[in-house]
Image: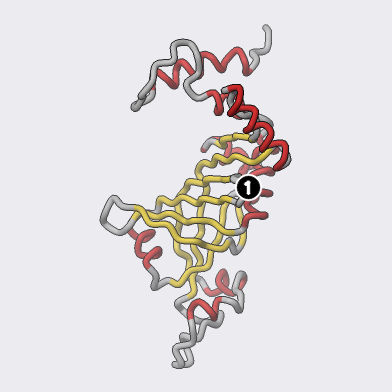
Amino acid sequence: MFPISIRSILPKYHQITRTMASFSNASTGNKPADPYTEKNLQEPSLTEKVEDLISFIDRTKFTMMTTRVGNSDLLASRCMALAAKEGKGLDFLFHTNTESGKTDDLAAHSSINLAFVNNSGEWASVSGHASIETGRDLVKKYYSPTLKAWLGDLGDGKHDGGPEDPRIGIIRVKTSTAQYATSKKTAVGSAIEVAKGVVTGEAADVNKLRKISEEEVQQWKAQ
C-alpha cells in the first residue's frame, strides 16, 4: 500500500471546497480560486503546529477578545492582555472586572474568539468557549498590582483593586479550534516575494498558514 501525498489530495480538496462553498463569485475551472492558501497552507506535526502557535501568542501577549452582545446577534471586541495559559498552552486566562459588559455578554453566550496580530501582519485566531471564574484562590494566583489602575479604589475598604476585591474575576477560555499565519521568511524576504507576485501574478509564498482542528486540540490536551 503506497502512502498518499498531500499534493495528490490538494486538487480534490479544492474541488470539494468549491462545490461545498455557500458563497462563490467566480468560476476558475480546474484551477484553485485561492492560490495563496494552496501555496502557504501547511500540515506539519501537531507538536510543531501547537508550539508555533503558543510561541506566537506569547510574543504578542495582547488580543482582541470578541463576544456576542447580550440578546442581539451583534459582536463586540475588546483589547485584553493575556494573564496565563492552561491546557498545555491552549487554554487562556484573562483578568476582568466582573461588572463589565464583556461578562454580561459571556453570561448570555459563552462562544468567544481571540484574535492576535502583530505589526508584521502575522496573526492567530482562536475560537472556543469562555467561563467567568470568581474563586479567590484562582484570582490570587494570577493577581497583578497593575489591576488597581484599571479598577480604581472606591474608598470603601473593599473595592480597592486588591486581590480581595470582588470585582476581579478571571475569564477562562477553553480553545476549540485555532488557525494562524506566521512568517516563514524575513521581513526583507517577504517584501521581495510580494513584489515578485505583483510583477508575475504568482501567489506569494510567505506564510506558515495552519489550522488546528477540534480533534487535534483534544488530542494535544490529552497527551
Q: Nearer the viewer, residue 129 or 192?
A: 192
Against 189, is 19 above or below? Answer: above
Q: How many callouts does the rendering have? A: 1
Residue found farthest to the top: 1
Q: Nearer the viewer, residue 31 or 17?
A: 31
Residue found farthest to the front: 199
Q: Position of residue 51 (x, y in %)?
A: 69, 44
Q: Which secondary structure lies at badge 1?
A: loop
Against 82, is 177 above or below? Answer: above
Q: Residue at x 46, y 50 (%)?
A: 113
Circle 1 crowding by C-alpha within 10 Å: few under 14, some 14–19, many from 20: few
Residue 109 location, quadrant: bottom left
The three-letter code of the residue at mark 1 reads Ser
Please name the residue that numbered disc 1 is placed on.
120
Q: Nearer the viewer, residue 183 or 169?
A: 183
Q: Position of residue 205 (x, y in %)?
A: 64, 29
Residue 16 location, quadrant: top left
| Scheme by which the image is coloured | secondary structure
Q: Residue at x 49, y 56 (%)?
A: 64
Q: Position of residue 130 (x, y in %)?
A: 45, 55
Residue 220 location, quadrant: top right
Q: Quadrant of the N terminus?
A: top right
Against 70, is 165 above or below? Answer: below
Against 110, is 50 above or below? Answer: above
Residue found farthest to the left: 71
Q: Position of residue 223 (x, y in %)?
A: 66, 41
Q: Residue at x 48, y 11 (%)?
A: 30
